[in-house]
Image (spheres, rainbow, N blue to C red):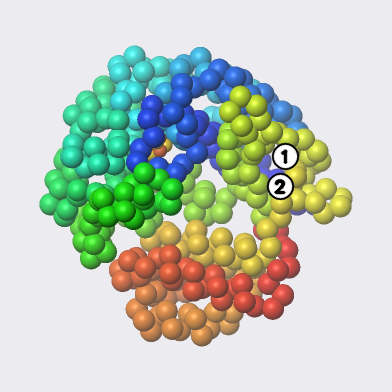
Amino acid sequence: MTQLPKDGLGIYVHVPYCIRKCRYCDFVSFERPPADEYFDELAEDVKRAGNALGYGTEYYVDTLFFGGGTPSLANARQLGKVLDALRGSFRIRDTEMTIEVNPETVTPEKAAELKALGFNRISMGVQSLNDEVLKAMGRVHSAEKARQAYRILRDAGFGNINLDLIFGAPGQDLETWQETLSEVLEMRPEHVSFYSLQLEEGTPLYKDYTADRVDLPSWEENRSMYHYAADALKSTGYHHYEVSNAALPGFECRHNLKYWNMQPYLGFGVSAHSFVNGCRGESDYSVGGCRGTADNLKDAPVSGPQSAEGRGIFGLEPESKADLKGDFIFTKLRLTDGFALSDYSGMFGSDFRQEFGPELKTLLDEGLLELSGGTLRFTAKGLDNTNPVMERLIGAVAERPGSAETRRL
Ligand code: SF4
């Protein structure tokens, strides 16, 4: 029986509350004050999950990520309750502990609280340092508030800060993007995430765009912004290690690397995902009442991830081989170093070149992917077309006979 690895588990905790919904946001978040009951449920779920795993505090968690929503809206007692449960149920030591913060919530007292709770990495949603752009996106904070928040966090002693930025936003052009970026580079955060604005159906921004009430930068402008950022970050010492992420050397986000490297993680909270040994699941919480990760875990065999009947790990569902191959391509290709074809054969027991021969050749000929030294990665041109390229490869897997067979990693 395959053993669940005792080292290197990631844990994600979702906190679904925000001061106000941003105009582009379709994340699971609600405009209401954080409810004590939600954190009580989370803590209980964490404890029950620890019991279900049967490993107790032997289980080593090397990354912990509180995301949202706006986790920094929660008070110290609410966050502390969940952290106590985590510390009681898992072995948390030398762990990268990230919390997402909104600049509007950052005060010296809040920063001191987060530090005292043990968080050692901050991810702050700045998005832009231009007030017009922030307003068009419906952000609650101003550019000046974001600058102040950054200084407060530094003064509180945080030495590992990520700033989230968005380009391709309404009212933004290459010049305003360059201004934001050059100010951010002067601030010198350890990590920068730079995402293209996604128009998500049903959001206020989507409705305004489809009704011609708002303009967005063209595709060409959007791509100029992306390449400008990637080049500026690289030329100032950042490692552009993932399509939309760059870090000073040694500050790559260990938690997110788990997603991109298909390493195991458990998610707690509304709509949080878990992925362990080729099995996935989503917790089903409602705010104030939940069926959580522990419910998925409760029938867990003590010694390993698969029951005698071959059920998925702890009630999580095993993915089909085709889906796992799709995940592999979709996650690993996002890393700018790409992946070694030998990793693919090691995981799936088949030869990538043989399996993807025609599709691979076409994508190489089109200059979207490059293959050198047995490693496959995006070219600069490919970075402008990541989703279509990955979909072409993944589509090729889905079409193969026998691809629905299940297999665990
Ligand atoms: S702060 Fe983040 S999670 Fe909250 S509404 Fe804005 S984008 Fe969504």
Disc 1 residue type (three-letter): Asn
Q: Nearer the viewer, residue 31 or 67?
A: 31
Q: Residue at x 43, y 71 (%)?
A: 389
Q: Which residue is under mark 2?
A: 316
Q: Nearer the viewer, residue 338 or 130?
A: 130
Q: Is residue 59 above or below residue 24?
A: above
Residue extending furthest toward the front: 211
Q: How far is disc 1 from disc 2 in space, using C-alphas?
A: 6 Å
**Residue 350 in the image, given as x and y percentages of width and height:** 64, 74
Whether residue 395 is visible: yes
Is residue 231 left or right of 283 when viewed as pictured? left
Q: Is residue 331 above or below residue 255?
A: below
Marker disc for residue 117: none
**Residue 171 in the image, given as x and y percentages of width and height:** 19, 48
Label 1 Cα crowd, 10 Å radius (few <14 / some 14-19 / many 20+): many
Q: Residue at x 31, y 71 (%)?
A: 381
Disc 2 residue type (three-letter): Leu
The picture quadrant where one finds residue 114 is top left
Q: Which residue is under mark 1?
A: 296
Is residue 14 left or right of 387 when viewed as pictured? right
Q: How many marks?
A: 2
Q: Residue at x 50, y 39 (%)?
A: 28
